Amino acid sequence: MNSKNLLIIFTRNPKLGKVKTRLAKSVGNKTALDIYHFLLQKTKEVTKNISCDKKVYYSEKITENDLWNRSNYQKREQFGSDLGEKMKNAIDESFKNNYEKVIVIGSDLFDLKPSHINDAFKKLDKNDVVIGPATDGGYYLIGLKKLHLKIFENKNWGTSTVREDTLKNLEKVDVHLLPMLNDIDVIEDIKNHSAFTKFLKPR
């Protein structure tokens, strides 16, 4: 792998009671963990054939012999006091390693397609920033050609104001918005989604 484009995937180490905690309030910790494993596998399927370098950033520690094979995914550990600082540090490291376009996604999107990521890289040819808006007011993807520090500072991460506040920080640059998608955080995000029916059957 020797691309000028980098895809960063932020993941949580899949541990019982540590992932999808808002969803777990409705379905229980075990089912929430099963759903997160399902979403991780989906993220791998979506990203594995995209033509770029890829790095998985783990929330706690790097795991070997998991679904992220080192032949296709480099592995790093997140560091920072909150999500903004963790993303900033990962992106900053990437530009220092001479990548020209860097895209960050999470690992809780069932509806994400390879075309969204490929389009984001393409739109960075003529735009400074690409954002994939999420229905909850945040974003599921952010793509950059240089580090914009302000967008990672002074945000209430995990709230409905994140995207609006981020766009205010970017008023002086060209921003392209991708289609809006729904990330998986609470029971309302999956209860009418056929892909998740198997997780919601009475046990």
Image (cartoon, grey):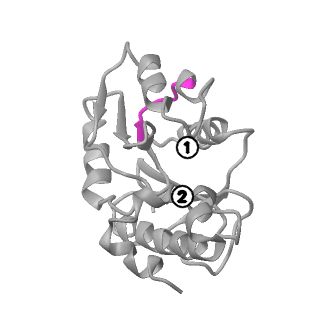
Q: Quadrant of residue 85?
A: top right
Q: Amino acid at mark 2?
A: Lys
In the rendered structure, which segment of residues is drawn in magenta? 142-149
| Residue 82, position as x, y percentages in the image | 69, 39
Residue 101 appears anywhere in the view? no
Of the numbered discs in the image, which one, if any, rests on residue 198?
A: none
Instruction: Residue 63: give x, y in percent of width and height.
Output: 69, 72
Please tell me which residue is depicted at 59% across the width and 60% down the height of the picture.
20
Say whether residue 179 is visible.
Answer: yes
Q: Secondary structure at mark 1?
A: helix
Q: Which mark is residue 94?
A: 1
The image quarter containing residue 178 is: top left
Residue bearing mark 2: 55
Depth check: 29 or 65 in front? 29
Contact, CB < 8 Å: mark 1 with mark 2?
yes
In the displayed structure, does residue 1 sit left or right of residue 113?
A: right
> Where does the image place residue 194, in percent across and percent down from the top left?
31, 73
> Which circle's residue, 1 or 2, is located before the other in the chain?
2
Q: Is residue 143 magenta?
A: yes
